[in-house]
Image (spheres, rainbow, N blue to C red):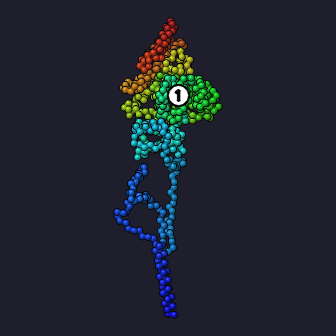
Amino acid sequence: MAVQRETALALLGVGLVLLLLIVGAALYMASPSQPQPVSETERTPTVTPTVPPAFPTTQTVSPTSPPAIVTPSLPPPTHAATPTVAPASGKETFTSLPAPLPPMPLPQLPSSFHLPQAKPAPVTPPETEAPRWARALVSTYRPRWRINLTRGVDPRLTAEGYAVTVEPNNQVTIEAKTNVGWLYGLLDLAERLQWREPVPAQWRWSPPLAERGLIVENPEWLMKSPRSQEALKRLLREQLKELAWWRFNTLVIKCYGNEANLSRVLNLLKQMAPDYGVKVVVWAKVLSPALQTWLQQGGQVATEVPAQGNFITVTTDIDLAANQISQGKVVGLKFQLVAPNIPSTVFQFRRNREKLLLVVGLDEAYREVFWFDPAWAHQVVRSVADAGLGGLWLTVASVPSAWAIAAFAQAVKNPNADGEAIWINRWAKQGHQADKWLVLFREASRIVPEILWLGVSPQPQYGSSLKSFFVARPIDISWGFTVLSVPETLKLVRRPDDRTTLTADEVARRLEQRASSVWALAAQLPEPAASDWKAAKRLALLNSWLGQFYANKIDAALAWGRFEEGDRAAGQECLLHLAKSVKAWEQVVNLANTIYRPNNRWALRLPEWQRELAEYQALVAGAMP
């Protein structure tokens, strides 16, 4: 029994030992392993960047050890406590979180546009000639700038609009919805740099007018196209670049319609123009086979006679315009620029105003004379935009033509700006006496419109006979003011109390005053060195002598009217003013001869005014007792 008891105890001891070994092994396996110490040479260095790089950097990696993954440290939470864990021996418990802070009141936002928008990712635009050209212009002034073009997500962006952000690390982001928006954004940036104007950190632009057309009449590249296709493409490319720079999105080619090169030009423009954000309209007198093909391809044709199909009717007849618009057609309503606003008759179009284009004429009455009036250009663009019209087409025959186009281009780019201040700032950087030059140009530019008020001729810059003042029909009240003709002025017993009414003699005094202002300022200013400035000064002086010619002609007509009513002394007064008008025309001819060919239209009219003076001298002499 004793032996059995010892054997049982031995087996029990062995079992306990085995049990302890098993439990110990289990506990060892369940316990976490302790980290092993490493030597200083084996320790992996940690990298903490101080400033995030603008672009991802490449990390240098040792060939024998894997790269360390660096996680940027997160800032501790401001008020949320970290839960603590109880020892493993007890129940797992969490400390209570502090009571949440009361919510801060949100600022009142005027609209959802102020909410943060998702940042658009840069995209790679197609490498076409227009954006390459615009990028190159920016690089000319800022070669280190990195330009990022992004697709627009801002709902305020229009199809041609853009938003520019200039960052301090030489990065510029242009956000737009279309390639044209990118093009305009790049050109805007280049223009600011060109004129050394401040470049704000952020700005945006949307066109004030949906359609901004420039009418080119019988262009040389159409009438005398070069034989080489590449040479013609270069000419057209330069035209498209100018349109894009000025933000005109419609090229209106005014021609006869049967030019030999028309099909060739239209085929090239169809390929090239969309890249510059330009559409092409042909304003022609004849619907030739070339234009029929153009219409079939989706092109547009403008005509002065209403027609069926994809035509734009251009007219001066307000009733015809209303009839065409009622049929859902696009109409161009043509006016010579006589005031910085639009006539009240335009407001009769209460519906479909977006189909009405205002065709602003600086052509017939302005041909070969000077016009540069930024204040008027800005006011015209604002008037068209405020009226909700479809847009504006500009036709220019004044010289230098680029000056008039530039005045309207700045109005399109920033219609709410002070147009005169823009040019004063720019000219001052060139060393010009900007304020005096601008007043001189303004006074000279407003002479021709005020001559137009009288209605004596559609082209008054080439003069008017004395008889025309008695049959003229002055501007109508739809422009916001009234001008009385010579016969109406002669019938007055006293001047009208209405200050929006101008008598013929008051128009004469205005013209006389503007001419005197031009002469006084021209005497104070040095002869400019640039050829276009020289031409502008001479043309402004030509305008001033035109104003003086008409001031004397009006006075002569009023005196002649009194002479015919029996005032014999008025006959000599008429002759005196006619003689002064001839002297003024001689000054016009002298200036015109320095600008144009000798046998210009002003020179050809001088004998006519000399004969007119002789004719009235004979009539006055014959009436003497």
> The disc labelled 1 sits on which kind of residue?
Val
Q: Residue furthest bottom?
A: 1
Q: Residue at x 58, y 29 (%)?
A: 294
Task: Name the quadrant containing residue 39.
Answer: bottom left
The residue most toward the top is 625
| Left or right: where 155 falls relative to 133 | right
Residue 596 picture location, percent across and down? 44, 19
Residue positioned 44% across, 34% down in the render: 422
Q: Report x, y in % for residue 449.
A: 50, 25
At a point 53% along the width and 27% down the height, the residue shown is 264
Rate crowding at label 1 as few (under 14), some (14 to 19) or many (20 or more) other CA atoms within 10 Å. some
| Residue 414 shows up from this direction | no
x, y (%) of residue 514? 45, 24
How many marks are shown on the rendered structure? 1
* Image side of residue 289 versus residue 42, left or right: right
Q: Is residue 319 left or right of residue 574?
A: right
Which of the pair 343/532 is nearer the observer?
532
- In the image shown, does 506 or 191 lie closer to the viewer? 191
In the picture, residue 166 is in which quadrant?
Answer: top left
Q: Residue 251, how many percent across, how many down?
A: 53, 30
Q: Which residue is mark 1?
A: 265
> Who is closer to the viewer here, 433 or 501?
433
Q: Is residue 469 above or below residue 44?
A: above
Identified at 50% across, 40% down, the residue is 126
